[in-house]
Image: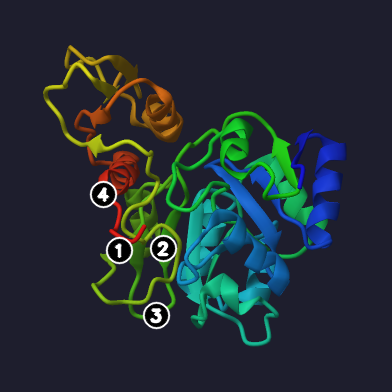
Amino acid sequence: MKTEVLKADAAGIARAAEVLRAGGLVAFPTETVYGLGGVATRDEAVERIFTAKGRPSRNPLIAHVGAPEVARRIAVFDERAERLVARFWPGPLTIVLPRRPGSGLSPRVSAGLPTVAVRMPAHPVALALLRAVDEPVAAPSANRSGRTSPTTAEHVLADLAGRIELVLDAGPCEVGVESTVVDLSEPDRALLLRPGGLPRAEIEAVIGPLEGRRPGEPVRSPGLVGRHYAPSKPVRLDVREVAPDEGLLAFGEDVPPGAKVTLNLSPAGDLAEAARSPFAMLRELDRADVRAIAVVPIPGEGLGEAIRDRLRRAAMEAPADA
């Protein structure tokens, strides 16, 4: 299969909507990362997402929508969810809710669970595409499973060329880390499943404190598997010293000397700036002639919580059967 790459203009969006309605797969930009979309009510399209990515079947997908009313057709919203939608949609927030009976969603979207993760992205191209399709579109990140997430069309093609029908190219993503995922599927609990592009404090200001997921609880959203977002080379975190054969991912003005290659997420120490490029810089260091990737300490507040989460998963050892 030859993967078509189109500019994300009106003609490109119309063509992408046509491909999706026909059961094909389209990579498209969101404000966070590029997503790999298939219509969520079509079993064969959803199955192809898992195949193209090499994604484990136990890992649910996020259903992306172009309007809150589309999300309400597939999920049961409570008062907390409505408050979050009113405040943060469109935007980098995914909400896990009970799946609405008779929704027509493919069971694979939710990995067989009675819940569904829903999001309304803020990127104008994503919104135009979703509104043209007028169906929920299942869309994990447009990369091979476990690898570094894509923030440009070039990143998508590096992993998925020949595996999908089309890529809509709208340049680099603005936020750079995936959406924050909040689980409201139980009426008496609000869980932060994945830190992301919307800081925890902003959500808690609207619905109160967020708990963490307990060991053994079902995996109700993407981004909860162990090793994830990973380059092919080893990653060391919170380093103060770096070896001469390592690449360094720096942050702020305090940069350890001696690395073979150094990239800085934000020389000014700005977490919003840093969040735009961890995946792109990890990819660049992975391509460099270095043995491993060393990462300086990143503050854990605000968007730093999401950056540290992605780096921690990137640094995990691969399972023996991977």
Q: Residue at x 87, y 38 (%)?
A: 11
Label 1 sits on residue: 210
Please indicate whether residue 69 sits to the left or right of residue 59 in the image. Answer: right
Label 3 sits on residue: 186
Compute the Cα span from label 4 to label 1. 25 Å
The one of 207 and 304 positioned closer to us in this rendering = 304
Q: Amino acid at mark 2?
A: Val
Compute the Cα span from label 3 to label 4. 30 Å
**Earlier residue among tags 1 and 2:** 2
Q: Amino acid at mark 3?
A: Glu
Rendered position, 16 above or below 73: above
Rendered position, 235 above or below 204: above
| Disc 1 to disc 2: CB gap under 8 Å | yes
Q: Amino acid at mark 4?
A: Met
| Disc 3 to disc 4: CB gap under 8 Å | no
**Earlier residue among tags 4 and 2:** 2
Q: Percent from the top left, x then y, of residue 306? A: 34, 45
Compute the Cα span from label 2 to label 3. 11 Å
Q: Secondary structure at mark 2?
A: strand
Q: Amino acid at mark 1?
A: Leu
Compute the Cα span from label 1 to label 2. 8 Å
Q: Percent from the top left, x then y, of residue 77? A: 55, 75
Identify the disc placed on residue 182.
Answer: 2
